[in-house]
Structures are given as C-alpha cells and as structure tokens.
Image (cartoon, rainbow, N blue to C red):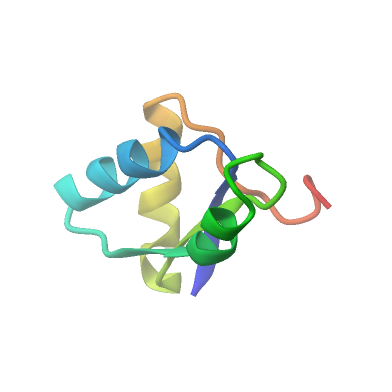
Amino acid sequence: MEELVRTTDPTLIPFARALLAAEDIDCFVFDHNISVLEGGIGAFPRRIMVRREDLFRARVILRENGIDIYEPGRWG
C-alpha cells in the first residue's frame, strides 16, 4: 500500500474516494479510528492508501481535481 493523501479535512476523504471509485481504483482509509477518538480537533490526519500499481493513475486523477497529494519527503 502506498500513501496518496494525508489530511485532517473531513470533507476531502469522501471526495477523493469518490473520484478514485469512479475510475475503478480501490482505496483504503487509514487512521480513521484515532481521528474519531481525538474528538475532531484535527490533531491526527487520516490517510488514503492505494495499491502500488494504482499509485500513478490515482495521483493524476487527484491532481487534475485540485487535491494535494502526498509526496514522500515533502511533508516530513
């Protein structure tokens, strides 16, 4: 699994998932439970993960729709 998006924005996750689903790309949300437990203060970002073979296509789709994607080394 490869990290595609890391965000504390609760509206971005369903939007990104819908875009990827429309292109038949499976994605998985990591860190959802800890984000819920922290009470919505935005301290723990959620991550959207995709299969390695879908990463390039997924990045293109999200960039074309104005979503800032995760790039290793850029965010720490």
Instruction: Judge by depth and name the residue closer to the eye, 54 or 40.
Output: 40
Q: Is residue 47 above or below residue 16?
A: below
Q: Is residue 49 above or below residue 42?
A: below
Q: Residue at x 78, y 45 (%)?
A: 74
Q: Residue at x 45, y 24 (%)?
A: 66
Q: Quadrant of residue 54?
A: bottom left
Instruction: Judge by depth and name the residue closer to the eye, 58 or 37.
Output: 37
18 vs 64, left or right, is left
Q: Residue at x 56, y 34 (%)?
A: 68
Instruction: Judge by depth and name the residue closer to the eye, 5 or 56.
Output: 5
* Residue 11 at x, y percent in the picture: 41, 33
Q: Is residue 6 above or below residue 2?
A: above
Q: Quadrant of residue 72?
A: bottom right
Q: Most extreme residue toward the top, as rendered?
A: 66
* Residue 15 at x, y percent in the picture: 32, 36
Q: Residue at x 40, y 38 (%)?
A: 62
